[in-house]
Image: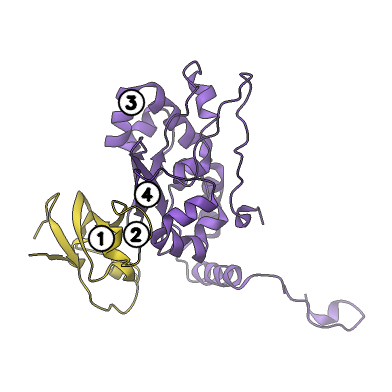
Amino acid sequence: MSEQDHDHPHAEITNGDEPPAARRARTLEELLVAKHVVRREDVRRMIDWLVSRSPADGARLVARAWTDPEFKQRLLADARAAALELGLDPGPSPVVVAVENTRGVHHMVVCTLCSCYPRALLGPPPDWYKSLAYRSRAVSDPRGVLAEFGVELDDDVELRVLDSTADMRYLVIPRRPAGTEQMDEAELAALVTRDSMIGVAHPAAPARDGGGPTTPATPGPRSDRVR
Amino acid sequence: MTYRVGQPVRIADRPHQGHHRTPGYLKGKTGTVERVYASFANPETRAYGATGLPEQRLYLVGFAQRDVWPDYRGNPVDRIYADVFEHWLEEER
């Protein structure tokens, strides 16, 4: 729309609150479309697929692994095949690798170089996962980061940080909470939070009255807020 | 050459102009091959419109945190793992 379209003068209307990264992404998309590298509908279809994914898919894998030891072995050996077994869509690539937390070993996942994440099984990553603070501190001071998420590991636990630097995406199978022996697979899946599959939280504790899961006592960092 | 699980390896300590997937904090550090993965297109050429061929073998390499961060404050047994392409690995004698 040009200035001649209406009858009063004013300063140019700009999208002044567009963050620099968003502006860069939008400019890149426009260039790639103009040069016929991608089509607008392909970008839209990919975004639709990405935002249609959710941690509920990963939670189903974990709950099945908790209740079926043989399935857990298949999940650890080939997460893609295990996802297909449950009718989940593991996406075309990259390769998902599941790792298991135990009494003596705790895994947590980061991507120091960008924001690699098992999006097909967990949906889009949380904002804090993409922050420079998490990406740098998760490798150099992982126990400090875990403490801020409310996770205190025992001194004898071996902490393993996985930096997903290339074509593999890591999914943590958290430890099954105590007191869940009578729960069925769907009830267990409701306990499996997104953050527990990144390895920065434990699963939700089962409610004492047998109802739904309790909210974890300690919330995540403030940067976890939805923008 | 192909590396095997359990073999000590050193991450090449060389600068690289342009896109690559070897994090700077691991360059020059010595770790152990934990898993041998498949081969994948080389992101260093694929990022610039080439095919990324020939594919490069990818490895999961594990390091003692104390070998990576001299002032690491956590448990001495804590480890850090990263996926590293074969052409960034060197034999550690």
Q: Are marks 1 and 2 in contact (CB under 8 Å)?
A: yes
- Report, in whole angstroms, how far the alpha carbon at label 3 lies from the one at label 2: 27 Å
The amino acid on which the numbered mark 3 sits, given as a three-letter code, is: Phe
- Mark 3 and mark 2 lie on one chain; the one further toward the N terminus is 3
Q: Residue at horizontal 55%, vertical 59%?
A: A40
Give the residue at mark 1.
B84
- Report, in whole angstroms, how far the alpha carbon at label 3 lies from the one at label 4: 19 Å
Closest to the observer, B30 or A32 = B30
- Circle on res. A169: 4
- Report, in whole angstroms, how far the alpha carbon at label 3 lies from the one at label 1: 29 Å
Give the residue at mark 3.
A71
In the structure shown, which secondary structural element does the residue marked by tag 1 occupy? strand
Q: Residues within 10 Å of mark 2 (few under 14, many from 20)?
A: many
Whether callout 2 and callout 4 share a subunit is answered yes
Q: Residues within 10 Å of mark 4 (few under 14, many from 20)?
A: many
Q: Position of residue A151 (x, y in %)?
A: 50, 45
- Report, in whole angstroms, how far the alpha carbon at label 4 lies from the one at label 1: 13 Å
The amino acid on which the numbered mark 4 sits, given as a three-letter code, is: Arg
- Circle on res. A78: none
Q: Chain of mark 1?
A: B
The amino acid on which the numbered mark 1 sits, given as a three-letter code, is: Val
Q: Report whether A146 appears left or right of A72.
A: right
Chain A as rendered: colour: purple
- Report, in whole angstroms, how far the alpha carbon at label 2 lies from the one at label 4: 9 Å
Chain B as rendered: colour: yellow
Quadrant where the N terminus of chain B sits is: bottom left
- Circle on res. A165: 2
Q: Position of residue A161 (x, y in %)?
A: 36, 52
Closest to the observer, B9 or B73 = B73
Is residue A82 something that shows in the picture?
A: yes
In the structure shown, which secondary structural element does the residue marked by tag 4 occupy? strand
Residue farthest along the top direction in this orientation:
A182
